[in-house]
Image (spheres, coloured by chain):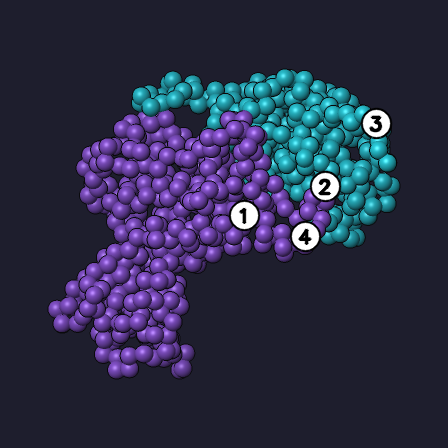
Chain colours: A cyan, B purple
Amino acid sequence: MKSSLKKEKHPMEKLLRMDRIPHIWCPGCGIGNAVSAFAEAVQKLNYDLDELCVVSGIGCTGRAAGYIKTDSFHTTHGRGIAYATGVKLGNPELKVVVISGDGDLSAIGGNHLIHAARRNIDITVICVNNFIYAMTGGQVAPTTPNPAYTTTSPFGNFEAPVNIPRVVEAAGAVYVARWTALHMRRMKESIIEALNKPGFSFVEVIAPCAMYYSRINRLGDGLNMMKFYYDNSVIKHGEPTENLDIGYQEEIIIGKFIDRERPTFSESLKSWKEEHGKGGEGDEE
Amino acid sequence: MKADPRDVLTGTYYIDGDVAIAYGALAAGCKFLGGYPITPSTAAAEAFARKAPQVGARFIQIEDELGSIASVLGASWGGQKSMTITSGPGFSLMMENIGHGAATETPFVIINVQRGGPSTGVPTSTGQADMMQARWGSNGDYEVIALAPDSPQEGFDFTIKAFNLAERYRVPVMVMADECIGHMTEKVVIPEASEIDIEPRRFFKGKKENYKPFKRDKSLVPPMAKAGDGYKMYITGLTHGENGHPLLNKKKLPDLDSAEVIDKKSTNRYLVEKIIKNKEEIIELGEENLEDADIIVVSYGIISRVAYRAVELARKDGLKVGILRLITVWPFPDEKITELAERVKGFVVAEVNYGQIAFEVDRCSRGKTNVTLVPHGGASVHDPDDIYRAIKEAAAEKKRYKGLREYTTSMELSVFGESLEEKYSK
C-alpha cells in the first residue's frame, strides 16, 4: 500500500546520523533524551558543527558518539575523557564534548574524571546515570543505590554509592548540574550553559534503565521510572553537593549546583607561557 | 619531505639514550607527548618537556598510563604527530589502547624503555622481555611495527623512523629500547634538518561527503582526516567497515551471519595485510658475513653489541660465524630466517629473556637447523663469553639437520649459582 503521508524530515537531521537510525537503545531508555537535549542545545547555540567533537567511552551511553553527526569517537572503556583531553590539546580550536555513562566515567574512568576537572580542561562532560551497568546485562555500578538489586548484587547492594557531582566539584569542575531525563527543557538549558562555560563542565542526567534496573527491582517499565524520577525530584539550585546522594526510590535533588570561575587549562598554560616559557619561533600560541 | 629546521636540535651531543629519543621525536615533528613517569624511561619525557615549548609541542603528564595512551590517540586524530614513553609495567597498562590504535588505524609511537620483569621487576636495570607483549599484547588480531635500537644514536634515528612508519602505515609503532640504551651516555650526532626525511601525514583530498575513514587505495593504507576539518567521521574500536561504522547490525545487514560480515565486510583483514604485504619495505636487518657462515648469531637491541664481541672472539678461533641483527623485530623476517636455515649449521639467539625471539627463529627455521638460545634473566646483559661458548658448542655439533628444536643453555644461571636441575635434585 502506498502511503499518502508526506515524508517529513527529522528536525535534528543536521545533527544526527540518520543513516544509523534506528538506534540500539531500548524502549523507555533515557539516553536518547540526553542526546536530544544535547542536539537541541547545539542547534540553539548555532555551532559550526565542524568545530564540534564528541567522544564516548563504552556502554550504552558510549554509543552516543555514533549517532551524532560531528567528528565522533567511540573509545575504550573509561578512557573517553583522557582521549578527549588529547583531542583538545591536539586541536585546541575544537569544542570537545564527552557523552558517556556513569559506569564508564565514574568507575573505570574515575581517575580521568577527577584529573580533567582538576586541570579544568575545556571540555563538557554529559554523564547519563542509570545506576547500573546496562550493556553488560545489569551488574552493580558505583552509583547503584542501597539496597537495589542487580545481577551481581543479587541480595541487594550494600556498598555506598558515589555522588558524582560531589566528586567533580571537589576536584575543581566549574559547572555542575543534574537533571532527570524528563527535564528536557532544563537539561537543554543546562547543556547550553555548560557548553558556553570555559573549563570543565559537568551535567549529570538521571535516566531509567528499563531493561535491567527497573525490571530486577520491579519498578515498572522505563516510562514509569522516568516519571517516578521526574515526580520525585526537587529543584534546589546551589544545593551543597554533599547533599546530593541518591537513595533507593527516594527524593532526588536536581538543579544547577556549581557555576564558578577558575582559570582553565588553556588560560593557565597561556599565562604560564607568558611568564616562563619563551617559546621559540615555532611556538603556535 | 624534509624535517622542519625549527624542530631539529642540530649538533653533536654527549647524551643518554632517553634524551636522544626525545630529540628524535622532536625532529620527527612530534607535537604531543602524553606520558606518565616510569623508570627507566622518565628522562625521555623530561627532555621532551624541557624542549617542547621551543618547538610548539605539548607535553602533558597524564594521571596514568591508560590515560596517557588514550590522550595520544586523541591528539593523533586532532592532527598531531604524537607519542608516549613508558617502560614494562606501563607498557602492559597501555595494551588495550594499542589495540584500539591498531583497529582505528591511528598513527602514533610508543617508546618502551624495557626493564627487567615480570611485574615491577627491576626498575633500574635492563631487560628485553617485552618483545612478545609488543607483538601480541592487545586482544585480537593485528600487526604492529617494532624497532630495536642498540645505542643512543639509534634511539634518535629509530624514533624518527618510527614516526615515519607510523604515518606511512597508520599503525602504532614501538621503539623497543631498554634500560641500557636509555641510561647509556654516548655521542649522538643530530644532523641538519635537510638531511632528515620526514613522512608527512597523508590527508584525504576528495570531497568531504565521499570520505570513508577506512577506504584504502593500492597501498592498503587509507588516507586520514583530522577532527575539526569537517569530515564528520565516526571512529570506533568496534569491528567496522570502510565507513567506520560498526558491523554486525542485524537491521542493516540482515542477510549475513556474523562470521561472514567479519570476513567480508570488516577492515580487520587489512590491519594484518597492510603490514605483511609491505613487509619488504618495512623490514630492516643488519647482516654481516652471512654468505659463508656456519653459525649465525641472531640478536637485537643492546645485545647485538655484545654479540659482535662474541663473534669477534669466535672468528679469532677460525669459526665461520655471521651476524643477523634485527633492526625491525616486528614484522618478523620469516623468509630470511627460513632461507638461512636451509644452509647453516645453527642459529644462536642471544636475548635478555628466557626465549621470546628464539621461538620465532625456531619457528621460521622449520626444523632445518639447530637453534641455540642464550638466555639471560635480566638486570644486566650477557658476558660476550657466554655467547661465544654457545657459538662454539653449536659449531661443534655433529648432526646438521636435527629436525628438532634443542636449546642448550650455555650460560649457567648465575643468580642461582648452580643449574636448576642440580639445585632441585638435591
Q: Chain of mark 4?
A: B
Mark 3 and mark 4: span between their CA atoms?
32 Å
- Type of amino acid under label 4: Leu
Give the image quarter of residue A126. top right
Mark 3 and mark 2: span between their CA atoms?
26 Å
Between residues A242 and B248, which one lies in front from this camera angle?
B248
Residue beneath label 1, please? Answer: B267
Residue B363 drawn above or below residue A192: below
Look at the image and tell me whether residue B404 can be seen. Answer: yes
Q: Chain of mark 3?
A: A
Give the image quarter of residue B422. bottom left
Q: Are marks 4 and 2 on the same chain?
A: no
Residue beneath label 2, please? Answer: A24
Q: Are marks 3 and 4 on the same chain?
A: no
Residue located at (64% from left, 17% from top) = A45
Question: Between tags 4 and 2, which lies in front?
Answer: 4
- Type of amino acid under label 1: Thr
Residue located at (39% from left, 64% from top) = B360
- Type of amino acid under label 2: Ile
Residue A5's tag is 3
Q: Is residue B191 left or right of residue B126?
A: left
Q: Residues within 10 Å of mark 2 (few under 14, many from 20)?
A: few
Residue beneath label 4, please? Answer: B256
Q: Is residue A167 left or right of residue B403?
A: right
Q: Are marks 1 and 2 on the same chain?
A: no
